Image (tube, rainbow, N blue to C red):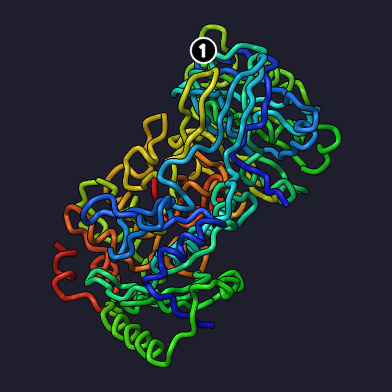
Amino acid sequence: MKWKLEKKDFQKFLQGLMEDYDLFAPVKLTEGVSEFKKINQPEEVYLNQLFTQKPAKEVFFPQSEVMFHYEKRGGQTQTISLEEIERERILLGAKPCEIKAISIIEKVFMSGESIDVYFLEKRRKTIIMGLACNHPLSTCFCTSTGGSPFLREGSDLFLIDLGESFLMEGITGKGLSFQENKFLKEPSEEDLNTAQLIESKAFQKVDSSVPVEGIEKRLDLMMESTFWNRVHEKCVGCRICTYLCPTCHCFDMVDEGGPQRGQRVRNWDSCLSPLYSLETSGHNPRPTGRERTRQRIMHKFNYYPKIYGQVACVGCGRCILYCPVHFDIRKAILWTSPKRPKKYEERSSS
Amino acid sequence: MKVKNPYLPIPAVVKRAYIETTDHMLRTLELKFLKEEDAQAFHFIPGQFCELSIFGKGEAPFGIASSPTEDGRLTFTINKAGVVTTALHHIEEGSEIGIRGPLGNGYPMELFKGKNLLVIGGGFAFTTLRSLITYFLHPANRSQVNQITVIYGARMPGLLLYKEELNSWQKREDIHLVVTVDWGDKDWKGKVGLVPNVLEELAPSSENTIAVICGPPMMIKFTLPKLVALQFPDERIYTSLERRMKCGIGKCGRCNIGHLYVCKDGPVFNYAQLKNLPRDD
């Protein structure tokens, strides 16, 4: 089912949503920097930036999250868990790649014997209104990892920016439930054609040549390759690639406060940090950049696929865009494949 | 339906606490759940571990040293090393503590049935081995395994754990216990020698036998070839691994070796499994 939403009605449409839901959408913080935040006024919603620096995972798995409070009362400590959220949520304006990434994290947090209740609560109370990616960047390679700039999967409602209006597609039952909304109109034949044209143009812009297919098997044979000795060399260990990665889900847990009262907090953590795996004895199973970079790449393209049958990379390109030393994960992927340029062979043997 | 929050510590209290070793670095805590229903719901097998919490300090993982056959007794032996373990060394009897668990897979007790058991331990890694041995020495379980042979080594006599228990095991007919130290003192009448050498000298048969080995990496490194020489196949050598852990339930990353997580897929693995894993050590 498809509708059309005129942009002149967009803020009123959002106002309507906010009566029933907490709305999360990109907000511009400063020039070139935006972030998913809870919206207080519809005009805060800012969809003009291709993507936010921090991905939409933050709505479900915040950078820093209080898990529970504890307080000693009458000689006994009470814990109060903060997993529950009061209102249902709408996540608006997330791009197909980061929505796909949410499903990748979901597999870790919402499966197995123990369920991550903090993630689960937010996930099941959130309706996702995805926004098609009309202008992919040169660093985008979602089509190489099984995605697409117009991937509908994961969205409940899918928006395509047509310039003066949005074309909206109801994907799931939750998305279709908005059909009675008074701002939604019948789209014209021309609108549908325009949307299709934008879609095929966007698709062509994305680099689909990154040889991700078959990488799990290739990496099986590369654990002790000399490739790892070289690949980490320019990494300065700033960890920005892992924090901004929409599929990275590692966290640390710390207590803030004293013995009387305080809170247990979890914070994003990174396998590229030497402290991440450092044991109290002083032993570190991943003592150098070699092992840590290997862990990052192997987890995404070998370990995760072994468990869940898909790579844990959606090709959003954030790690390429924001790396201070221009580490390019596409090159690392390419190196693992027979398509690698000859010069790599020479370098590895040197 | 409300899903159980796996991150919330269950309230417990320190019932008893005592120093085990002459260097005062190892202390055993005996814990008791505050609520009877929590005690009833806590079922574990030897080899599993728990996350112990001291509010304001944080959490750390420890193998369970007691056995499920000990009528609800729940003990942990703590090596003083970091922030949480130091706090656990200073916590007084009667103080509160938080427990999450039991976590991890534990020893494959079903597979041990009908076999001889060769248990090799070194240093303070003896905790979950004590749990395992105690489980099979219980009258209700003793017939599940055939011979039980234990080699336990420490650097010095004063660093041996659970001394009274070791003495009582020495007197029993249904367990062959060999205790050894790297170097003795004037009162030491027992064996002096490194665990791998003692194993070689003892040369137990590998026939229908499972070896469970737990100890410092150096001990394991030199003991494994001796087991191989005794013709133990990789599938019948079990060990329990340690890694830095936080969540204990396979969510936070961190403790993986290849695609396996030590916290949820382990900590107990056999050598056939470990051989197939990429080396991160």
Q: In the orientation shown, which residue stands out farthest toward the top? A: B186
Quadrant of the rendered image containing residue A204? bottom left
Question: Which of the two residues, B172 or A187, is positioned nearer the viewer here?
Answer: A187
Location of the C terminus of chain B (image quadrant): top left
Question: Which of the two residues, B148 or B230, is positioned nearer the viewer here?
Answer: B148
Residue at screen point 69% across, 36% down: B132
Q: Is residue A138 above or below residue B135?
A: below
Q: Is residue B67 above or below residue B83?
A: below
Chain that bears disc 1: B
| Horizontal and vertical percent position of residue B22 | 53, 11
| Horizontal and vertical percent position of residue B28 | 61, 19
Residue at screen point 61% across, 31% down: B151
Question: Which of the two residues, A144 or A217, is positioned nearer the viewer here?
Answer: A144
Quadrant of the rendered image containing residue B199? top right
| Horizontal and vertical percent position of residue A291 | 32, 50
From the viewer's perspective, is A88 left or right of A98?
Answer: right
Q: Is residue A55 above or below residue A72?
A: below
Tell me the element at label 1.
loop
From the viewer's perspective, is B185 left or right of B33?
Answer: left
Q: Which residue is mark 1?
A: B24
Residue at screen point 28% across, 63% down: A49
The reply to whether residue B165 is in sight is yes
The reply to whether residue B232 is in sight is no
Q: How many marks?
A: 1
Q: Badge 1: how crowded within 10 Å, few (<14), some, or many (20+)?
A: some
From the viewer's perspective, is A291 left or right of B48?
Answer: left
Residue at screen point 66% across, 14% down: A75
Q: Is residue B227 above or below residue B160?
A: below
| Horizontal and vertical percent position of residue A221 | 37, 67
Amino acid type of the residue that numbered disc 1 sits on in the rendered structure: His
